[in-house]
Amino acid sequence: MFRASIRSFDLVRLAVARVTGWVWYWTGNLGELFFDRFGRLSAIASVLWACLALAVHPGSWTYPVRNMFSKQVLFTAVDAIPAALRFGGAVGVLLIVQAAMWTDAAGATTEIVAPILWRSIVREIAPLLACLVVIGRSGIAISTELATMRASGEVEVIDSMGIDPMTFLVMPRVLAVMISVFCLAIITAVTMVVTGYAVGFMMNAIHTSWNDFYGEIASNFELSDLTFFLSKTMVAGGFAGAICCLEGVNARGSMTDVPRIASRAGIRALTAVFAVSAILSILFYNKILVFQFG
Amino acid sequence: MTSDAITTEKPAPQWEFAAPILEFHTVNFKGAGETSIQMKRFTGTIRSGELVEVELERHHNPRNLVSMMLGLNPPDAGEVLYDRQDWMGTDYARHFQMRSEIGRVFAGSAWIQSLTLRDNLQLPMRHHGITETDAEQKVAHWIRRLAGHQRAKVKWALKKRPTVVEPSVLQLCQLIRAVANGPRLLILERPLRFMLESLYKNFVSVIDDLRDAGTAVLFFAGDRDEYQLQFRKPVQHWRIVDGAMVTAGGRRP
């Protein structure tokens, strides 16, 4: 009896020790993960803040910085217009034709559908698509370029000449990405509406004239749409630019690590863009997605 | 006539009274990697107009050490002062301003590969507020002084990116970039590597003229040819003993 109770006591003690160890292990991991994410987020916020602080200081805009900025805008915005048109056209067709078909089936009219479509395009889809184009086309290129510069000692050369790498390399790129996302989102939104209408009209999915369709959209345009659009493109673009630059500048190791760093930067930037987009929507609508009723 | 000659003649340099440009106070520095030059409780000063020559062995890499002198890496202990100011703290604008007064010829990678050589040469000057015309004039002046018979080659290379330019021309361009803006401190890491021997005398005369104008020069000499250059006296010699820099000099036999 006594021996049995001792054994069961040992078993309990062992179980408690195991559970405690397990709890400690997972708590430690959770804490590590939290601090890692928090550190990364604060680094991104610091880069964004530093970029904005440098950008408003006229002394930062020396000739080489202006030159770098204009080259980056050319590459990130102007050269990406065909890609934005293609993406906008394809998604516009998918979205508007599908919406028109389903609303026909439900018996709704274009007057009801057009503003909903416009809002979803302006507030959600166009900024996201523009971010995807910019990250895929330029964000990864930026992180590759900066990581290569870091690995080959070019950042050290710039630093040695008394040029702040933050001012010369990071700030123009982050700003260029922000502005490019904004401009490309406008192009994407317009392309989506125009192409969607044209294809929908041809497929007999949209029955109203262009004037009526456009009139519905224009009459439903609100200042809040602009606020949404501006904040989503600028904030998400800023995050994308800052993450790509940060990954590139923080690169350690040799040239062989550059492709890994570039792909990681792309994935992290995409994740951040979706997360920022979702968080901004929650903040703007003051609803925790669909779970808050009334 | 005689009195004129006396008044215009430069006084002999009084090294001990010249302003200190770069000072080391009991500096410890390990560097990264086994080829990096170290400092062990190193104390020394380079003054305005002074030339300090450090003779390197083939395996020595001065890049980390020079980056530490420029405040890019902190020393393990001690203090490095440029123009009586340290590299500590977060006054980054002051640090960048201080670095803009220092010319450097790099051992190893020295160029921004995405820019042409002309843009590379003009980058530090344009960034620090010099107009395009002035920057071009300065570059043209130093090409005339340094490039000798390679002048046409250098001018042609200015339109190209560094990857397609031959090393002897690149090295000349590095030297031009380092001296173009009238540096107060010039740090040369194996500056004559790849350079044609016929241009050595141009190099020596440029260094002597810069010293006359008050530039302090720290010269990491890379091979026997570089040790034999006849600079204007006096020349201080620091040495590398067991991988660490010491001030007790003397030219090697």
Image (cartoon, coloured by chain):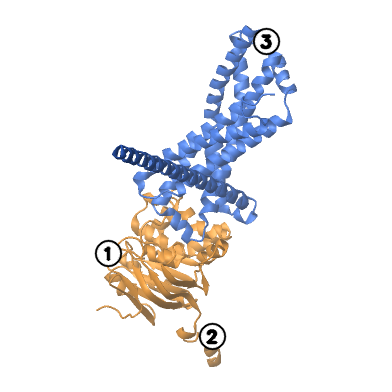
Chain colours: A blue, B orange
Q: Is residue A13 above or below residue B1?
A: above
Q: Which residue type does callout 3 highlight?
A: Ala
Furthest-right residue in this view = A219
Q: Is residue B48 above or below residue A8?
A: below
Residue at 37% x, 52% y: name it: B165
The numbered mark 1 sits on a residue in which chain?
Answer: B
Instruction: Give the CA separation, mark 3 to mark 2.
Output: 97 Å
Nearest to N terminus: mark 1 or mark 2: 2
- Dot 1: within a 10 Å radius of its alpha carbon, few (fewer than 14), some, or many (20 or more) residues? few
- The answer to whether any part of residue B158 appears in the image is no
Furthest-front residue in this view = A1
Badge 3 vs badge 1, beta-carbon distance below 8 Å: no
Viewport quadrant of the C terminus of chain A: top right
Task: Specify the label residue B8 is tagged with.
Answer: 2
Per the image, the residue denoted by label 3 is: A108
Q: Nearer the viewer, residue A268 or A93?
A: A268
Q: Secondary structure at mark 3?
A: loop
